[in-house]
Image (tube, grey):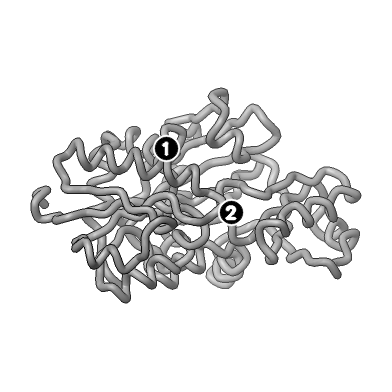
Amino acid sequence: MSMQKLGKVGVLLGGRSAERDVSLKSGRAVLAALQRLGVNAHAFDPADSDMAELSAQQFDRVMIALHGRFGEDGTIQGALDWLGIPYTGSGVMASALAMDKWRTKLLWQSAGIPTPEFALLDADTDFDAVVARLGLPIFVKPAREGSSIGMSKVTAASELRAAWKKAAEFDGLVLAEKFVSGGEYTCAILAGQALPMIGLVPKKAFYDFEAKYLRDDTEYRVPCGLPAEQEQTIQQLAIRAFDVLGCRGWARLDVMIDADGQPYFLEANTSPGMTDHSLVPMAAKAAGMTFDQLVLSILEQARVG
């Protein structure tokens, strides 16, 4: 596709979620890549401008570089469907499902996709019973946030209530997840194909917001270190997990692999980060793609509905 046929492109960035700052970084990197390629691309922040302006300014398609609520959860996608403007990534249903880690896990369980055991937490929860069932450690997280915002690793039963309160500051739906001891990996999907997996080795206790965006000592292993046959098996399972949610275009799936080699899928990110610390660009590079080529490939798949 020629750059002229792409038309006028809006890069949606910023937004109103707790991940606004990360989205601004992703969006600026994407915008710079498109402009380097000669695309008629412009920044558009939904927090500053009414969505109707996308039509008024005659954008032909948009690249979504929003993260979290109001950008990755189906709301922006629904508005763009209404406006009839093609957009990148998953549609309304898949975006909403993937943003909700609890419902993602329910769907994966029903389809036979392995995912760690879990429980929902609220003010009336019997926290001791949750510890007895899931064991320790336990990861506690807001069900509908990303970038590890509000997440805690609970190592003592007495910490669970405080971890719930912390997560509940960001979302009324709070998930407690059984800890899987083993390696942490991520698998990106692009245009129906799995990119090379990445092994994550954070220097902190787990791969949290600081490890993702602020520290420079997190180790990213590409190749991931798994035997080729095992990596291929997990990649095919990741594509299935992607398809079960109804995703399209691109996404990144996070997975833990226990000591016995059993993978457990944690979540799917339908609008992954595109910063200098982000994982999908690393995976694309390992597959022989430049950052600019990756951005263009994502944009070319933009569609309505």
Label 2's element? strand
Question: Left or right of 258: which side holds 57?
Answer: left
Foreground: disc 1 or disc 2: 1
- In the rendered structure, which amino acid carries the disc numbered 1? Thr
Q: Position of residue 171 (x, y in %)?
A: 66, 61
- Residue at the image point whose x is 58% and y is 31% from the top: 201
Above/below status of 9 relative to 215? below
How far, Cα to Cα, is label 1 from label 2? 22 Å
Question: Left or right of 200: which side holds 15?
Answer: left
Residue at the extreme bottom: 82
Question: Left or right of 176: which side holds 304?
Answer: left
- Residue at the image point whose x is 37% and y is 38% from the top: 281
Residue on which the image places disc 1: 275
Q: Can residue 133 be seen in this view?
A: yes
Q: Which of 105 and 279 is in front in this view?
A: 279
The quarter of the image holding the C terminus is bottom left
- Residue at the image point whose x is 33% and y is 33% from the top: 285
Above/below status of 129 relative to 65? below
Q: Position of residue 221 (x, y in %)?
A: 48, 30
Q: Can residue 265 be seen in this view?
A: no
Q: Position of residue 90 (x, y in %)?
A: 38, 63
Residue on which the image places disc 2: 266
All told, the count of numbered labels is 2
Labels 1 and 2: the sequence-earlier one: 2
Label 1's element? loop
Q: Nearer the viewer, residue 72 or 196?
A: 72
- Residue at the image point whose x is 52% and y is 35% from the top: 199
- Classify mark 1: residues with Cα within 10 Å, few (<14), some (14-19) or many (20+): some
Question: Left or right of 52: which side holds 146?
Answer: right
Q: Position of residue 69 (x, y in %)?
A: 52, 60
- In the rendered structure, which amino acid carries the disc numbered 2? Leu
Q: Which of 80 and 274 is in front in this view?
A: 80
